[in-house]
Image (cartoon, grey):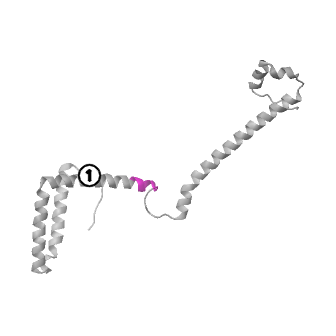
Amino acid sequence: MNTVWSNRTVLPGEAEALEARFGLRVTARLNAGTDMLPHDVSERLRVARQQAVAMAASPAISAKRAAATTAQIVSAQSSTSSVAFGLFSGERTSWWNSFARAVPVLVLLLGLFGIDYWKDLEQIDTAATMDVALLGDDLPPSAFTDPGFAEFLLEPVVDVAPQ
């Protein structure tokens, strides 16, 4: 049987017609092999069909079935979205896929540690440059207690290395 799938939306009236046609196909397929069944089995099947039709006709059962169908659709959509991202599919993955997922996180962490280390080195270099400038200059001890000297220390450091 050849089936053609399309991206066309199905209208509400068409959906009911499709369901009815599907039901007729299933019924025909199930009835095709009943001629070869023993009489007691075919009677049990007939009674079971009648009970199923009676239950399906009940409004309370129809509402429960609609709610269950909605829950199944929501569940299928959520599981499909997680499988699409490949993060929580529940399937066993190879070590290569696990490694490929972990590499960006490791690179990010190494980059953050590298930036922190570089910033610490810059602060140490700045403090060392300031210390060299202060210790290499002739200052009287009273300059260290001057409030203006504290302001001088807060200003940006100018490179004082001889050229």
- When asked about the image quadrant of residue 132, the answer is top right
**Lateral position of residue 77 relative to residue 65, left or right:** right
Q: Identify the main secondary structure in magenta.
A: helix
Q: Nearer the viewer, residue 11 or 152?
A: 152
Q: What residue is rendered at 14% in x and 63% in y?
A: 52
Q: What residue is rendered at 75% in x and 27% in y?
A: 156
Q: What residue is rendered at 86% in x and 30% in y?
A: 135
**Lateral position of residue 83 relative to residue 5, left or right:** right
Where is residue 6? Give x, y as percent.
30, 55
- When asked about the image quadrant of residue 124, the answer is top right
| 85 within the magenta span | yes
Rendered view: 138 above or below 17: above
Q: Nearer the viewer, residue 18 or 139?
A: 139
Where is residue 54? Give x, y as percent.
10, 61
- When asked about the image quadrant of residue 33, the answer is bottom left
Where is residue 85? Give x, y as percent.
45, 53
**Label 1 packing within 10 angstroms: few (<14), some (14-19), many (20+):** few
**Lateral position of residue 15 relative to residue 121, left or right:** left
Magenta span of residues = 81-87
Tell me the quadrant of the picture where the N terminus can be found: bottom left
Tell me the quadrant of the picture where the C terminus can be found: top right
| 158 within the magenta span | no
Amino acid of disc 1:
Thr
SS for callout 1:
helix
Where is residue 100? Give x, y as percent.
55, 58
Rendered view: 144 above or below 58: above
Q: What residue is rendered at 74% in x and 40% in y?
A: 121
Q: What residue did someone put label 1 on? A: 70
- Farthest residue, direction right: 138
**Lateral position of residue 31 relative to residue 116, left or right:** left
